[in-house]
Image: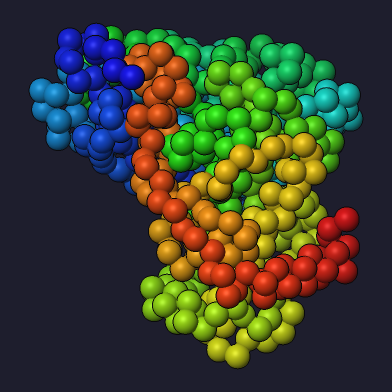
């Protein structure tokens, strides 16, 4: 499909920008209409401060300066081509929120996605909105956006103070007026995607006045146009469209090309995120599997594990060497659940969960191999859970993120799943945000944008001689989880 002509610069080759508000940095990428990278830049953010009370906070006042810097560097690299930028979208972590004044200036630290202080307001919200949560398969927890909004509401009572998500702050600074939030970031903040409204009874029970929250729109919808002030600060063209984004996990799914019913992607970064596309809502009353709304209708069921690439954190400097050795060694002689945190949330949920090994490894190579297999076992367990909920999987699993760069890990995962894995290079959150920016501007819809702009996948086949042994190890893994009472 041919792209539309860019309005701001009148160019036959329009550009779009995807912004990823990660925990430690802002990343901006400018993409052309074929998905090619035209410019990129990043800017550091301060590390969140974690407290013994379970708090996790970041100075939200640093967000806009970092975005401004990253965008200005991109437009400086582009020169006159920056006038062809047609649209921009911002994506961020789910559950990170802050409070702003009438000028969109943060008046409180951001409550980060992993802050655990909201146990009490989350419990009140669960009771007050029990019927709704059962319908949509969302269970407010201490780390949910709803609980974090409650913490903010308690300490920011000045008239006119609003409660917003990370992308809302950036979009408002770009367009110069308050904006709607997207249904993806709002999902765990007390939004009902079935009825398309805030769950007022639950928010009020948690101490959050709904009038302090923004309106909600679907992803990839226009929020406003870049103002003259923001254009002067960033180099973006005046009149460039700012469009609503999605959470970073959803953006990674889109970037991998999983936009049609039956397609599934596993994104392995610090944690493992697995998401599918389904025409129907996958109803999981436990909340382990939850569903974002697809920007064009339908649902994106899946979840985010507490394990993933983080399992290899203590081997960061020797991964390439260990990968080669692990591939030569073959399947591990022990089973490992490489969880480094307290508790698990997907593919099962249990706050008691802890990492374990069925035996001590013979050496670091076997430990490394067992960790790679352990994450793959979690992936297989997640797929089985989706299947039990009626989610259909058509074709091979796509994979992206830092973990997908390891060919060894991809082969192990293909062998555990017993089918090829589609490795999608370069599919990250900034590209997913760029696809949302292109949807409705450069291309008529998301499917059209993804068909052209998403990277081409590379097939990774299973190792035939390892499939049977890994199937046995997977059953041992399941038995270990069940014996500990974590898996029903």
At which x and y percent is residue 219?
52, 21
* Residue 375 can be seen, yes or no: no
At which x and y percent is residue 285?
84, 36
Between 176 and 415, the residue placed more toward the observer is: 415
Which residue: 40% across, 13% down? 444
Q: Is residue 145 above or below residue 321?
A: above
Q: Is residue 165 above or below residue 112?
A: above
Which residue: 60% across, 74% down? 466
**Scheme of colours in the image:** rainbow
Q: Is residue 306 left or right of residue 255?
A: right
Quarter of the image for residue 484 reads bottom right
Which residue: 67% across, 25% down? 279
Which residue: 58% across, 56% down? 419
Between 415 and 345, the residue placed more toward the observer is: 415
Q: Is residue 487 left or right of residue 446?
A: right
Q: Is residue 335 left or right of residue 17?
A: right
User: In this view, which residue lies farthest toward the front?
Assistant: 464
Quadrant of the snapshot with the C terminus: bottom right
């Amino acid at each position: 499909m041919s792209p539309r002509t860019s309005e701001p610069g009148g160019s036959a080759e329009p550009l779009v920008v995807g912004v990823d508000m990660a925990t430690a940095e802002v990343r901006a990428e400018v993409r052309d209409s074929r998905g090619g990278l035209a410019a990129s830049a990043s800017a550091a953010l301060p590390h969140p401060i974690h407290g013994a009370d379970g708090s996790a906070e970041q100075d939200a006042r640093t967000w806009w300066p970092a975005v401004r810097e990253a965008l200005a560097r991109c437009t400086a690299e582009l020169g006159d081509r920056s006038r062809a930028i047609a649209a921009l979208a911002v994506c961020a972590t789910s559950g990170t929120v802050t409070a702003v004044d009438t000028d969109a200036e943060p008046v409180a630290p951001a409550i980060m996605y992993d802050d655990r202080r909201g146990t009490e307001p989350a419990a009140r919200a669960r009771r007050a909105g029990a019927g709704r949560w059962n319908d949509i398969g969302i269970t407010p927890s201490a780390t949910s956006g709803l609980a974090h909004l409650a913490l903010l509401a308690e300490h920011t009572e000045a008239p006119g103070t609003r409660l917003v998500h990370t992308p809302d702050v950036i979009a408002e600074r770009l367009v110069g007026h308050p904006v709607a939030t997207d249904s993806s970031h709002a999902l765990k903040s007390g939004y009902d995607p079935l009825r398309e409204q805030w769950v007022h009874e639950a928010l009020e029970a948690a101490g959050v006045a709904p009038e302090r929250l923004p309106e909600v729109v679907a992803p990839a919808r226009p929020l406003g146009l870049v103002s003259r002030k923001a254009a002067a600060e960033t180099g973006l063209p005046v009149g460039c469209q700012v469009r609503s984004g999605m959470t970073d996990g959803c953006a990674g799914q889109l970037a991998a090309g999983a936009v049609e019913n039956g397609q599934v992607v596993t994104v392995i970064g610090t944690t493992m995120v697995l998401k599918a596309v389904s025409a129907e809502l996958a109803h999981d009353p436990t909340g382990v599997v939850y569903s974002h709304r697809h920007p064009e209708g339908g649902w994106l069921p899946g979840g985010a594990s507490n394990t993933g690439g983080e399992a290899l954190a203590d081997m960061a400097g020797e991964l390439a060497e260990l990968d080669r050795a692990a591939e030569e060694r073959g399947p591990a002689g022990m089973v490992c659940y490489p969880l480094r945190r307290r508790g698990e949330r997907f593919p099962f949920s249990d706050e008691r969960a802890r990492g374990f090994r069925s035996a001590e490894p013979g050496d670091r190579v076997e430990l490394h191999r067992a960790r790679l297999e352990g994450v793959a076992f979690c992936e297989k367990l997640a797929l089985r859970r989706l299947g039990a909920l009626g989610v259909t999987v058509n074709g091979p699993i796509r994979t992206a993120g830092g973990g997908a760069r390891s060919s060894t890990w991809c082969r192990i995962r293909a062998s555990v799943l017993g089918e090829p894995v589609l490795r999608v290079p370069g599919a990250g959150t900034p590209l997913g945000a760029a696809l949302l920016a292109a949807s409705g501007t450069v291309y008529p819809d998301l499917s059209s944008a993804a068909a052209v702009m998403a990277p081409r996948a590379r097939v990774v086949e299973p190792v035939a001689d390892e499939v049977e042994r890994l199937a046995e190890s997977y059953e041992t893994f399941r038995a270990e989880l069940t014996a500990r009472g974590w898996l029903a």
